[in-house]
Image (spheres, helix red, strand yellow):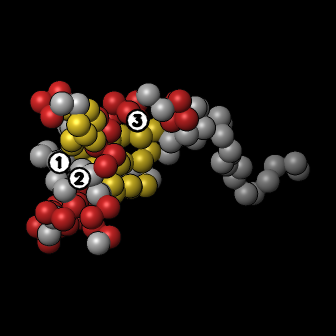
Amino acid sequence: SDQSHIPQVKVHARDGRQKKKVLVLCTGGTLTMAPDPSLNNGLAPVEGALSQWMQQMEELQQSEMPDVQVHEYSPLLDSSDMGPCQWARIATDIHENYLSFDGFVVLTGTDTMA
């Protein structure tokens, strides 16, 4: 018989497999900066700036790219102002969303490295 005892399961692209999903958690920093008219168009953290920028990225619109969901914390924080309470919040958010996403990206400012 040509029948195999091993079930055949497709695992390649465009065969019914769902796209990967990535959750981006943004606390603030340089990637959230945009010109602020109240500062004579100087750069300042702007809520929604990262989401808008990522929506315009052509690379993320390609069919082989994962679905990306962005969550910007409010208020945006300078990473030098973050501490254990904020880090615990990020960890909790990852834990609560762990089964809904395939990957997580946490964006913080570069002051974290200082």
* Quarter containing the C terminus: bottom left
Residue ID at (65%, 36%): 15
Q: Foreground residue, 52 or 70?
A: 52
Residue ID at (33%, 55%): 107
Residue 92, given in percent of the width and then of the height, sits at 20, 62
Does residue 86 appear left or right of residue 63 in this picture? left
Which secondary structure, mark 3?
Answer: helix
Residue 112, given in percent of the width and then of the height, sits at 27, 67
**Amino acid type of disc 1?**
Leu
| Lower position in the chain sequence, tag 2 or tag 3 | 2
Residue ID at (87%, 48%): 2
Q: Foreground residue, 11 or 39?
A: 39
Q: Foreground residue, 65 or 11?
A: 65
Find disc 1 in the rendering and name its residue. 76
Q: Foreground residue, 90 or 18?
A: 90
**Amino acid type of disc 2?**
Thr
> Dot 2: within a 10 Å radius of its alpha carbon, few (fewer than 14), some, or many (20 or more) residues?
many
Q: Does residue 51 appear anywhere in the picture?
A: yes
Which secondary structure, mark 2?
Answer: loop
Find disc 2 in the rendering and name its residue. 27
Does residue 81 appear left or right of residue 66 in this picture? left
Find disc 3 in the rendering and name its residue. 54
| Lower position in the chain sequence, tag 2 or tag 1 | 2
Residue 45, given in percent of the width and then of the height, sits at 21, 42
